[in-house]
Every structure is written in C-alpha cells, then in structure tokens.
Amino acid sequence: MTYAASRATRRFDPTLVALVTFAAITPLVLLVAPAVASQLAVERGLDPARIGTYFTVELGAFSFATIPSYYWLGRLNARVVAVAALAVFCAGNLVTALWMPDYPLFLGLRAIAAVGGGTLMVLCMTSAGESENRDRVYGLWVVGQLVAGTVGLAVLPRLFDHFGLPAFYVLLAALGALASPLCRGFDGDLGMRGKSAGVAGAATPRWLAALVICGMLAFYLSIGGIWTFVSGAAEAAGISAAATGTVLAVATTMGIVGAGLASWLGGRVPRRGMVILGYAILAASLALLATVQGVGAYVIALCGFKFAWTFVLPFILAIVATHDATGRLVASLTLVIGVGLAVGPLIAGNMLNMGASLTTVILTGLVVVIASAAMMLRAEATPTAATLANDA
C-alpha cells in the first residue's frame, strides 16, 4: 500500500512521523553548526580551515548518499534500507564519541555517519514526495528541522560545558536508536509510485527535470550565500554583535512560522499563488537588506527573508515531487541542496574577497532568486508526465 493510500485510512500516520523525526535528527550536526564549530575550536584546538573542512566532509558525505540511492530506490525494500542506514548512522556517531581519534580518522568516522544520515534523508524526502498533500508534508519536514536546530543551539552549550564534544555524538546515536522503531513507517515499496500507477513510461522530460533541478540549485545558491554573510549587513547598519544575535534568533522563529504556515495552507490554497507570494516576499526582503539603514529596517528585512525562505520552500519542493514519476528526481535534491549550501557561501566569499560590496552580493543573490522563481513557476505551469500520458 502506498503512502498516499495508507494515510487516508489511518488517523495516525507513521510515515509522516518517521520522515519528520529522521529529517530532524540526521542533519543535526549541520543544523547546530555554530555551536559545534565553537566546541571543535575550544576542545580539539582546530583552526578555522580545519573546522571548515570538517563541515565540508559532513555536508559532502551527507549529500553523497544521493548517488547510491539511484540504484537502491525502487529496487530494495525501503524499510530494510532505513534500518541499515540508521545502524550506520548510530554506529558512526557512537564510535566517534568513544574513540575521538586524530583528525584524519575523525573525519573518516564523520563521513561514515553522514552517509547513513544522508540515506535516511533521501528516504524522508522521497516519502514526502509520494504523499497525498506534498505541500503540507514538506512544510512539516522544514518545521522539524528548524525546531531541532533551535532547541539544539539552546541546549548544546550547556551540554558541552558539562560533558564535552563526545556527548553530542552520543546524543545523536541515542536519538537514532530511540527513533529506530519508526523505520517501519516507511513504505517498503518506496520509489515504485510511477510503476504502481501504471505510468512507468511517462518519464519526466529531461528539460523539465533540468529546469526544476536548476531552479532548486539557484534557490539554495542564493540562500546559502546571503545567510552566511547576513551579519555583515548588521555591521553596515551600525548594529552591535549582541543585538545582531537577538535579531538572528527572532528571524529563526519567523522561519518556523513560515514553514508552519506553509504546512497549514498546503492543499487548502492554489500552490502557484503561494509560490508567487513567497518569492515576492523573499525578493522584497533582499532588496531591503541590500539598502538597509537602521535597526528597524534590518529586523524587517531579515525576518522577511527567513520567513519567505521557509514559507516558499515546501511549495517548490512539492513542485519537484509533482513531476517525479520514480522518486529519483526528489532523491537528487539532497545532493542539489548540499551543493547549493556549499557553493553559495564560496561564491559570495570570493566576491567579497575580490572587492565586491555586500550590497552587490545581496543584489546578485536577488537576481538568482528571481531566476529560481521563473524556473519553478514554469515547472508548476507544466502538466505532469502522468497527466500527459492519461490525456494521450
């Protein structure tokens, strides 16, 4: 029984619980990166270059999990894959905590754990893509990560003060173990949606697949580059570091509100209208951020940016899923998001190093966001492969 069919017959949706839970746990290292980075410097004496390499390895291995999913998705039982991936994730984190080896082996263990977590994330994203109300489910997917990141950033400093860095990896392993029964919530036939629907031959046109992938990549290139250096706009507006931290916390809360609202609206209102609204608020926020003067304008711009980012994201993820007949297009998003979040800051940083102003960087991001909006709206207006096959 597929997810779409099963959730209509059960009030408790185990798939939804599983995908929201694992999507919050598996990328937690990246969601609480500032706290982990500080502890790596204090406890292990890592310099900024090595800390940057650490997160590159975490993100790269997490994203790499997309590649093997092209083979197993739709061929192997998703529950078996989930159990195996969770075992790798838990074992990698536990061994890291108990051993804490020298830097090269440390990175190797983190890569192993991240591949397990990334595989679970592929399952989560593909499950959401096969749901009946994708907009709502992707909204909850985003909310779970934002809440986990917010709680983690509040709790980890105290955890580190008492127990040190190993305690964090023990926590990850423990959370994974506690969530292990949820592996049964994944549909064993995940990735077989197109075949079971009798539209196996109605593959997504290559141009359309390229369009949505480029649209998502552009979105994350812009978001990743601007969010990394957004505190620079506060400095330009004469805002203190302490006040900037407070604004960032408020903006994170607005991100939760945005994703929650998207989840509530999902299936209730036309998706196209919500995509236009989300991108419009995002563009307006970036335009304001590029010319910000004073605390008030900065708060409005940053809160609008974070709200629009998380509000529009579930809807554009749903657009990709709508055009995915096999699950592999959605699975690719784990890699696309990873590349965007890694390359976006790299491009923005190099622009700043070459003498570009922060205003130029933000306006460049605005242009990229507009391009992303054009691509995703074009995809939303295109009939799905299944619809075209049925019409034929």
Image (cartoon, rainbow, N blue to C red):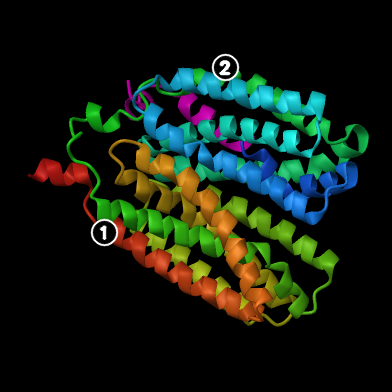
Q: Residue at x 30, y 36 (%)?
A: 326
The picture quadrant where one finds residue 301 is: bottom right
Q: Residue 13 in magenta? A: yes
Instruction: Tell me where residue 216 sits by quadrant.
Output: bottom left
Occupied quadrant, residue 355 = bottom right
- Residue bearing the label numbered 1: 381
Gap between marks 1 and 2, in whole Å? 40 Å
Q: Is residue 78 visible?
A: yes
Whether residue 288 is visible here, answered yes or no, is no
Report the amino acid beneath label 2: Pro
Image height of 384 relative to 328, above or below: below
Residue visible at 26% across and 59% down in the picture: 381
Residue 315 drawn at (x, y percent): 42, 52
Numbered disc 2: secondary structure: helix
Mark with earlier residue (1, 2): 2
Residue 52 placed where, x, y %?
72, 52
Which residue range is magenta in the image?
1-25
Image vertical order of residue 304 relative to residue 261, above or below: below
Pick the residue in front: 18 or 166.
166
Q: Which residue is mark 2?
A: 181
Magenta stretch contains residue 305? no
- Which quadrant does the C terminus fall into? top left
In this rendering, position of residue 192 left or right of residue 246:
left
Crowding around mark 2 (Cα neighbors within 10 Å: few <14, some 14 to 19, many 20+) is few
Left or right: 21 as drawn, with respect to 262: right
On screen, residue 297 above or below 217 = below
Q: Which residue is drawn at the image coordinates 42% and 49% (left, top)?
A: 317
